[in-house]
């Protein structure tokens, strides 16, 4: 009868060591990923973000909490449809540098995208359909909070919701001025 083989004690010790090393490296890597993911606000409290939009005497405020609850925006319509004090020429570069042309058709920018509404005509008709808002206020709200009004034939979630945070207020005003200057009545 052959003798039973004795198991090498170093193989099981080596396996244990590898598992301990793997676990020891996994936890710090996981914690680093969690920390980077949770602290991307760069010092801003993620609990509440308040956006105030002022356009030609109109004020629109909306408050968003981290649980994505949104208080409905209140807007006072004014007769003017100005561009919010922005520079339309600078707005053209904001339009092109943020990829707006890939989704929207807009003649002043030479854009022919078909994913989103046609900005040559849609803002004017949609602003009237959305409680007869001032055009500039409607365009600004559509950029900052794109799901506040969904144009007929389109679905919620197509437009990125990050432009309210990624664009500075002057870039946002310039973009609004550019779109309003090219929108047809």
Image: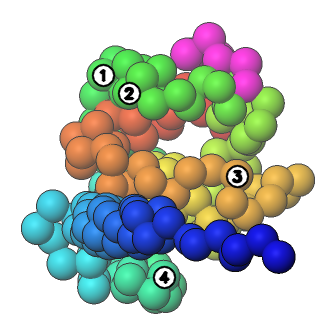
Q: Is label 2 in contact with label 4 (beta carbons under 8 Å)?
A: no
State the mark number for residue 68: 4
Tell me if residue 30 can be seen: no
Q: Which residue is mark 3?
A: 158
Earlier along the polypeptide chain: callout 1 or callout 3?
Answer: 1
Task: Nearest to the eye among marks 2 and 3: give it.
Answer: 3
Q: Is label 1 in contact with label 2 (beta carbons under 8 Å)?
A: yes
Which residue is painted at 45% across and 30% down in the image? 98
**Frontmost residue, 82 versus 100:** 100
Q: Position of residue 158 (x, y in %)?
A: 70, 52
On whether residue 10 falls in the magenta region, the answer is: no
Task: Nearest to the eye among marks 1 and 2: give it.
Answer: 2
Q: Quadrant of residue 131?
A: bottom right
Left or right, residue 62 beside residue 179: left
State the mark number for residue 90: 1
Q: Quadrant of residue 64?
A: bottom left
Earlier along the polypeptide chain: callout 1 or callout 4?
Answer: 4
Q: Local crowd at mark 1 within 10 Å, few (<14), some, or many (≥20)?
A: some
Q: CA distance from mark 1 to mark 3?
A: 25 Å
Q: Is label 1 in contact with label 3 (beta carbons under 8 Å)?
A: no
Earlier along the polypeptide chain: callout 2 or callout 4?
Answer: 4
Q: CA distance from mark 1 to mark 4?
A: 32 Å
Left or right, residue 29 beside residue 176: left
Q: Local crowd at mark 4 within 10 Å, few (<14), some, or many (≥20)?
A: few
Earlier along the polypeptide chain: callout 4 or callout 3?
Answer: 4
Which residue is painted at 11% across and 67% down in the image? 43
Region rendered in magenta: 107-113
Q: CA distance from mark 2 to mark 4?
A: 27 Å
State the mark number for residue 94: 2
């Amino acid at each position: 009868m052959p003798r039973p083989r004795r198991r090498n004690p170093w193989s099981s010790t080596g396996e244990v060591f590898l598992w301990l090393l793997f676990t020891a490296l996994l936890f710090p890597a996981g914690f680093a990923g969690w920390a980077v993911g949770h602290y991307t606000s760069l010092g801003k409290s993620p609990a509440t973000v308040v956006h105030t939009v002022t356009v030609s005497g109109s004020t629109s405020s909306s408050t968003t909490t981290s649980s994505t609850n949104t208080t409905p925006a209140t807007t006072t319509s004014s007769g003017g449809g100005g561009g919010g004090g922005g520079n339309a020429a600078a707005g053209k570069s904001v339009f092109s540098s943020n990829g707006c042309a890939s989704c929207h058709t807009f003649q002043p920018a030479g854009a022919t995208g078909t994913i989103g509404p046609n900005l040559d005509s849609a803002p004017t008709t949609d602003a009237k359909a959305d409680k007869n808002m001032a055009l500039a206020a409607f365009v600004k709200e559509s950029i900052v909070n794109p799901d506040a009004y969904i144009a007929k034939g389109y679905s919620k979630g197509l437009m990125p919701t990050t432009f309210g945070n990624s664009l500075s207020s002057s870039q946002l005003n310039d973009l609004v001025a550019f779109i309003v200057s090219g929108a047809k009545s």
